[in-house]
Image: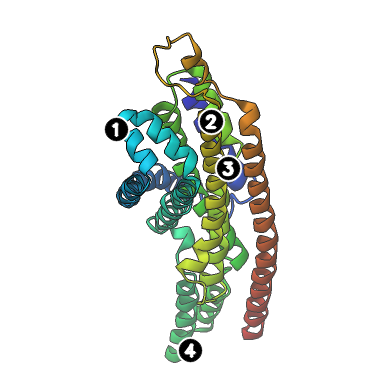
Amino acid sequence: QPPAVLTLVQAFFIEWLVHWKYCRFDLSFDSVVKYFACGFLLTTPMAVLFEGIISTLTSLIGGFVVVFIFASDDDIASEVQADPTKAIKDFVVKYQGFFVFNVFINSFVVAAMCEELVKYFGYWMVVVPDLLPQEQRVNLASRNTTDASNTEESEEDLDTNQNNQLQPRKSAVSTGNAITVAMVSVALGFACCENLIYIFVYSPPSLGMEISTLLARSLFPVHPLCAAIQSIGVCKRDLEGNRKFGLGRILSPAVLLHGSFDFVLMLAAYYQQRETIIEGNDDDGNGAGPDSEGEATKEVDLAAQLPSLIAGFVFVIIGIVYYAVESRKQSRRLMSMDNAARDQSSLLV
């Protein structure tokens, strides 16, 4: 179907832009395929499972809170017996704080933290030769030189061992690029599968709605952007040797961006539904036919969604600027490391 094809095209285009256009010599195409497949096939089911567990727990806690509110509010308690539907609508309108807090939990805990965690561990589930520790190659070369000096090999063998010692190793800049491409590939696989789920499971069975859902999700590439932000922390820890960057510091910027983005969209959806209830335009199901007002309320109100879309776009721009600034700083530090290693190699020669 066209939406499925467009979903794949969108993911492959970003993959081509990130990997093939700028970093194709830093990470092999075979590795990119493996990371993308891991994101598509492994991390998405993990996210669905863990989000389901966390959502169940938060729903149970929220259910107890709702029961307590209903028991303490005499007006809503009496409405529950007379008209449960009206009681629920009054509850939605009256207790804004409960729903705002619920949106916050769903945005930052259920969605952002869970998804960023599975994407991070999805990156670690794949082991490829491009990202194996480089120290092994250096140790082998130095060990060959030591063995040669101890056994007094011929001059020709010594030259061979010196050449082995001087074999070019992968630079820190190239390794950092490879880590970024790998983590973005996992995120693209995850986002591609998630988009397919949103289009064919959560959206109404309409071609126009499926395409509009895809376009809305394609305008905000939050998953690959958050993965790129995560890669900065991974490079700080693994390449720059900053052991203070643990899991929390690596994930926190991505979780903050992802959670804020989801929070704005979910909060706008809640207040839009609340205004609809106040204005009496919600679908009560009072005999309205499929071609009457009940169907009209299901149409997408772009004017009402525009502020939230603009806010989401602003968060994406903030994330891009943050990544660009931090990535440029890190590239300078990695280049300094490469220059220092090159100077040290020249002194050894």
Q: Dot 3 corresponds to which residue? A: 221
Q: Is residue 158 among what the camera can see? A: yes
For mark 1, give the secondary structure.
helix
CB under 8 Å between callouts 1 and 4?
A: no
Cα separation, mark 3 vs mark 1, equals: 46 Å
How is the model colour-coded? rainbow
CB under 8 Å between callouts 3 and 4?
A: no
Cα separation, mark 4 vs mark 2, equals: 87 Å
Q: Dot 1 corresponds to which residue? A: 81
The disc at residue 278 is 2
The quadrant of the rendering that contains the N terminus is top left
Q: Quadrant of residue 125?
A: bottom left
Q: Say whether disc 4 or disc 2 marks the residue closer to the N-terminus.
A: 4
Give the residue type that dot 3 points to.
Pro
Give the residue type that dot 2 points to.
Ile
Cα separation, mark 2 vs mark 3, equals: 34 Å
Which is more toward the observer, 73 or 124? Answer: 73
Q: Residue at x 57, y 39 (%)?
A: 268
Cα separation, mark 1 vs mark 4, equals: 92 Å
| x and y percentages locating residue 144 in the rendered image | 46, 80
| x and y percentages locating residue 121 in the rendered image | 40, 57
| Residue 276 as seen in the image, left or right of residue 68 | right
Determine whether 262 is above or below 6 in the image. Answer: below
Q: Residues within 10 Å of mark 1 (few under 14, many from 20)?
A: few
Residue depth check, mark 1 versus mark 4: number of the one nearer the observer? 1
| x and y percentages locating residue 91 in the rendered image | 42, 39
